[in-house]
Image (tube, rainbow, N blue to C red):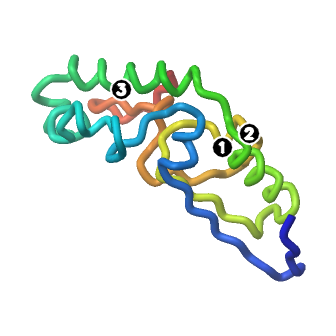
Amino acid sequence: MLAFSPTDRVFILTGAGVSAESGIPTFRGVGGLWRNYRVEEVASPMAWHRDPRLVWEFYSMRRRVASAAKPNPAHFAIARLVQVLHERLFVCTQNVDNLHEQAGSKHVVHMHGELFKSRCDTCTRLLTT
């Protein structure tokens, strides 16, 4: 493991590559989700208003894939750093899965939201799936 001084602060930003190793498809890579879907059709407020069933089915498929995935060594290495650095480590991810949390990371910031948390578009109540 790397050596850290008591004053070191670390920022970790993860993206699709970390979750791809766990079997979650990326968006732009070979076989990526955007090769099969246009973002405007399935991942925008306009898409939701136009065809909520299609958007819901797209995200339900993504939730099924993410539910079957397990954290990989990268997720566990980051979780170990959390144990060493505590509040001096800031973990931010572009991924919408919960693999960091499954591995033991706490207080992960999800830049693009979380697959297993939805918000009602009428009353803004938070729903967990």
- Amino acid at circle 3: Tyr
Q: Earlier in the sequence, mark 3 or mark 1?
A: 3
What secondary structure is marked by label 3? Answer: helix
Q: Which mark is residue 103?
A: 2
* Residue holding disc 3: 59
In the shown orientation, is residue 128 left or right of residue 91? left
Residue positioned 41% across, 26% down in the render: 62
**Are there few (<14), some (14-19), or many (20+) residues within 10 Å of tag 1?**
many
Measure the alpha-carbon separation of dots 2 and 1. Answer: 5 Å
Measure the alpha-carbon separation of dots 3 and 2. Answer: 23 Å
Measure the alpha-carbon separation of dots 3 and 1. Answer: 19 Å
Q: Position of residue 3 (x, y in %)?
A: 88, 74
What secondary structure is marked by label 1? Answer: helix
Q: Position of residue 1 (x, y in %)?
A: 86, 64
Residue positioned 30% across, 18% down in the render: 57
Marks 2 and 1 in Cβ contact (< 8 Å): yes
* Residue holding disc 1: 100
- Amino acid at circle 2: Ala
**Are there few (<14), some (14-19), or many (20+) residues within 10 Å of tag 3?**
some
In the shown orientation, is residue 30 left or right of residue 19? left
Marks 3 and 1 in Cβ contact (< 8 Å): no
Q: Is residue 14 above or below residue 114?
A: below
Q: Is residue 94 above or below residue 87?
A: above
In the shown orientation, is residue 17 left or right of residue 87? left
- Amino acid at circle 1: His
Q: Earlier in the sequence, mark 3 or mark 2?
A: 3
Residue positioned 77% across, 52% down in the render: 77
In the shown orientation, is residue 60 left or right of residue 64? left
